[in-house]
Image (cartoon, rainbow, N blue to C red):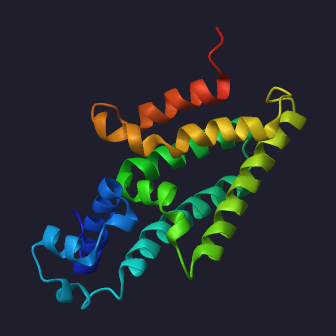
Amino acid sequence: MRKLETRKEEIVRVAAQLFKEKGYSAVTMRDLAAEMGIKAASLYNHITSKQDILQTIIISLAEEFTEGMNEVIRSEKSSIEKLKKIVQLHVTIASANTNGMASLNTDWMHLEDQLEYYLKLRNDYEQNFLVIIKEGVKNLEIKSKNPEVIMFSMLSTLRSLYLWLPNKEDVSSSDLALHLSEILIEGINK
């Protein structure tokens, strides 16, 4: 049974959609209220500001990625298996939050009070990703190429999933994670 959405959750969901369509800077509280069919003043019964909404969207996703990465890091799996788990993490989060992922990727620089915290989460995530790749190279699981280029290549694809996913409703997230893992981790060589 699906949990009923609170009014604040509805505001955040609708705002994320508008932010994706128009960009954070272009969306006003009046736009959000009009989209929801309510008066702008009514929004303030549930949120404090547009910035509050953006922080809710971005920080919750960044913390979800951090929590997932921490689970991967703590696991006793091989580096390749850890990378597959990271691909699955990205597919799962992006599939459930395409609009929020747009804000995470394009509007993060508009965070005010939470910018430093967000950047720490992102940097820690990338450092953990790099550690996994370097361990894989050291353990002869991964080709001895530049680990930063490997990470950049993988993250570039994974971070842009939100752009591609809305048009691919016929693709299950488990199949997508499997196919992405095969391509991103095992390469495209025969």
Q: Quadrant of residue 62?
A: bottom right
Q: Position of residue 55 (x, y in %)?
A: 46, 75
Residue farthest along the front direction in this orientation: 26
Which residue does the image show at 42% across and 54% down from the upper left?
102
Q: Position of residue 73 (x, y in %)?
A: 72, 55
In the foreground, 66 or 122 = 122
Q: Position of residue 171 (x, y in %)?
A: 34, 32
- Tally the marks: 0
Q: Is residue 79 above or below residue 128?
A: above
Q: Position of residue 127 (x, y in %)?
A: 76, 55
Left or right: 146 as drawn, with respect to 24: right
Q: Is residue 6 above or below residue 163?
A: below
Q: Is residue 8 above or below residue 122?
A: below
* Rendered-image quadrant of the C terminus: top right
Left or right: 39 as drawn, with respect to 124: left
Left or right: 32 as drawn, with respect to 94: left
In the foreground, 77 or 68 = 68
* Rendered-image quadrant of the N terminus: bottom left
Residue farthest along the left direction in this orientation: 37
Which residue does the image show at 48% across and 67% down from the upper left?
58
Q: Quadrant of residue 67?
A: bottom right
Which residue does the image show at 22% across and 72% down from the upper left?
32
Which residue does the image show at 26% across and 77% down from the upper left?
29
Question: Is residue 4 at least partly visible in the picture?
Answer: no
Q: Quadrant of residue 28?
A: bottom left
Left or right: 5 as drawn, with respect to 75: left
Q: Is residue 132 above or below residue 108?
A: above
Question: Is residue 117 at least partly visible in the picture?
Answer: yes
Residue farthest along the right direction in this orientation: 138
